[in-house]
Amino acid sequence: MGACVVAVLFGMAFPGSDALGSRRSSRSSSGYVLIYSGSAVCEGCAEAVGDVVVAAGFPVRYAGRPAKVPSLLASAFVVPETDDNIEPMRRSFNRNVRPALLRFLRGGGRYWGLCGGVFLTVQHYWATETQYVSALGIVPANAETYSDDDSPHIEKVRWYGRLRRMYYEGGPYFMPRRHAQIKVLASYSDGSIAAFAYHYGKGKVILTGPHPEATSGWLTEDGIDPTGWKSTFPLAMAMLSNLPS
């Protein structure tokens, strides 16, 4: 689908309703999911995320510039998969988006990050073998690319206790800080953390390294043998739908 350096960041809180409210209120006509479609986002990636959002029953809007994001965070926020160089976007988000995003979460917003998109949310990550970068510092964890092979392939992931074969493309594993109050949702075959949930103020953050939203079309496009693979798209929709709870 494109270089997985930044994938999905999802926040949920809807105008005129409690961010922790019912499923009905979260799908009200006044709510929408904002998808960032600006610099560094790979071709077709914003639309791929939009497919998940629409399938889960939420309206979608797109924003092409970081400066537009803070005024639109009253609803939801998604940053799709990007190209290799995320540094300009990281700097722009630090300057323009981070303060609004933290207020959004403290007030009960919801934020979902998938694959490389989570690199923006952690404390620090390795941008290169010699460059250790400070990120947005939203969650009490650091991140590092899980596999030496960052090309698209299938990884075995134990998610909610069930072993799954999942689409992977350069996503991270997580190293939580000591005493960090996180809930581990999934682990890679070596036991390292592949996904976790964390409460920030009244808000909630879920971060994942692999791609539960991948479809069979992704495997076909990337020439991946689908033997033994079953779609985890329903898992992505379930996570999206249950995030307000």
Image (tube, rainbow, N blue to C red):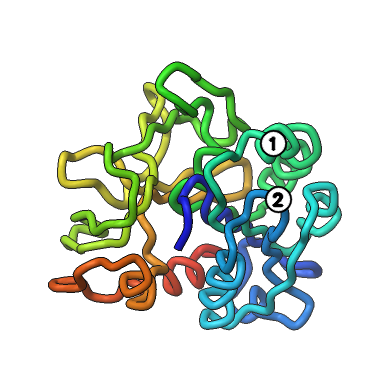
Give the SS element for disc 1: helix
**10 Å neighbourhood of mark 2: few (<14), some, or many (≥20)?**
some
Residue 13 at x, y percent in the picture: 69, 62
Q: How many marks?
A: 2
Image height of 185 relative to 55, above or below: above
**10 Å neighbourhood of mark 1: few (<14), some, or many (≥20)?**
few
Q: Quadrant of the N terminus?
A: bottom left
Left or right for 220, reference 77: left
Residue 120 at x, y percent in the picture: 57, 38
Q: Which disc, if any, is residue 88?
A: 1
Residue drawn at (60%, 40%) of the image: 86
Residue drawn at (20%, 73%) of the image: 226
State which quadrant residue 73 falls in.
bottom right
Q: Which disc, if any, is residue 39?
A: 2
- Is the Cβ of the residue at disc 1 closer than 8 Å to that at disc 2? yes
Type of amino acid at the residue the image marks with label 1: Pro
Residue 188 at x, y percent in the picture: 22, 46
